[in-house]
Amino acid sequence: MQSRELTLGRTFGVTFDHGDDFFDTLIAFCRAEDIHQGYIPMFLAGFEEAEIVGTSEKLEDPNAPVWSRVHLRNVEAVGCGTIAYDRENDQISPHIHTSLGIKDHGATGHTSHLLSARVLFPRRDARHRGGKSDDGSSARPELVRRSIVDVRRCIATVPPPVRSRREGRSSSTSRATRRMPRRHP
């Protein structure tokens, strides 16, 4: 096992709009806020469609990576992940795990790596027509949900604590020596 103390930096709540590509929007947000590393402890979302890693076929080698995709539509999602940055290629790389429930199949569940997703919201203008959407179905305004991603920027390269010889405990001066710059006061 390996461990490091992490110093948390800025925390954001991000709301996606109907039709947004999940990864493109998340990456654009990270670029706008100069986030190169972090973690997403949890997100809740409705996806119009999503692709995850998976197969229904027997695996020759259960330990080998699976490269096939499963395409799902009209799902509720909960997930978490990390954000990494490749300096050489100037590329932000979110790594997302998710559990998806297909709403019109008894909330049948699928869990895996998220490969792509498009955000789904009930039509916002439905609340102005007596709770009816364009197709005549009910749309209660209080149920309009938001996809929220809590991105916590952290430093993973914190030096190990300094041990006091007399006490054998960590000293209070063993905090991270580098702090992340703030963009906003």
Image: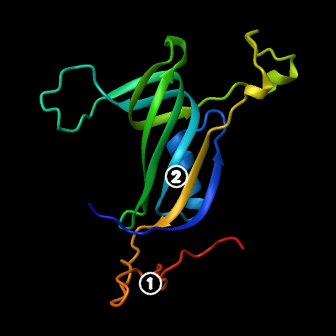
User: Is 130 left or right of 155, judged from the image as shown?
Assistant: right
- In percent of width and height, residue 30 lies at 55, 57
- In percent of width and height, residue 67 lies at 26, 34
View extreme (bottom): residue? 166
What residue is drawn where x is 47% and y is 28%? 100
Residue matched to label 1: 171
Question: If you read the primary sequence from the N terminus, does the residue marked by circle 1 or circle 2 appear first?
Answer: 2
Residue matched to label 2: 27
The quadrant holding residue 143 is top right
What residue is drawn where x is 49% and y is 83%? 172
What residue is drawn where x is 26% and y is 60%? 1
Q: Secondary structure under badge 2?
A: helix
Residue mark closest to the camera, 1 vs 2: 1
The answer to whether one can see residue 92 in this image is: no
The quadrant holding residue 6 is bottom left
What residue is drawn where x is 67% and y is 37%? 146
Q: Between residues 61 and 34, which one lies in front from this camera angle?
A: 61
The numbered disc on residue 101 is none
In the image, residue 84 above or below residue 101: below
Q: CA distance from mark 1 to mark 2?
A: 38 Å
In the image, residue 29 above or below residue 154: above
In the image, residue 73 above or below residue 63: above
The quadrant holding residue 2 is bottom left
Q: Secondary structure under badge 1?
A: loop
- In percent of width and height, residue 19 lies at 62, 33
**Circle 2: residue type:** Ile
Q: Between residues 178 and 176, which one lies in front from this camera angle?
A: 176
Q: How dense is the environment of label 1, judged by Cα within 10 Å: few (below 14), some, or many (20 and up)?
A: few
The answer to whether one can see residue 123 in this image is: yes
Q: How dense is the environment of label 2, judged by Cα within 10 Å: few (below 14), some, or many (20 and up)?
A: some
**Circle 1: residue type:** Ser
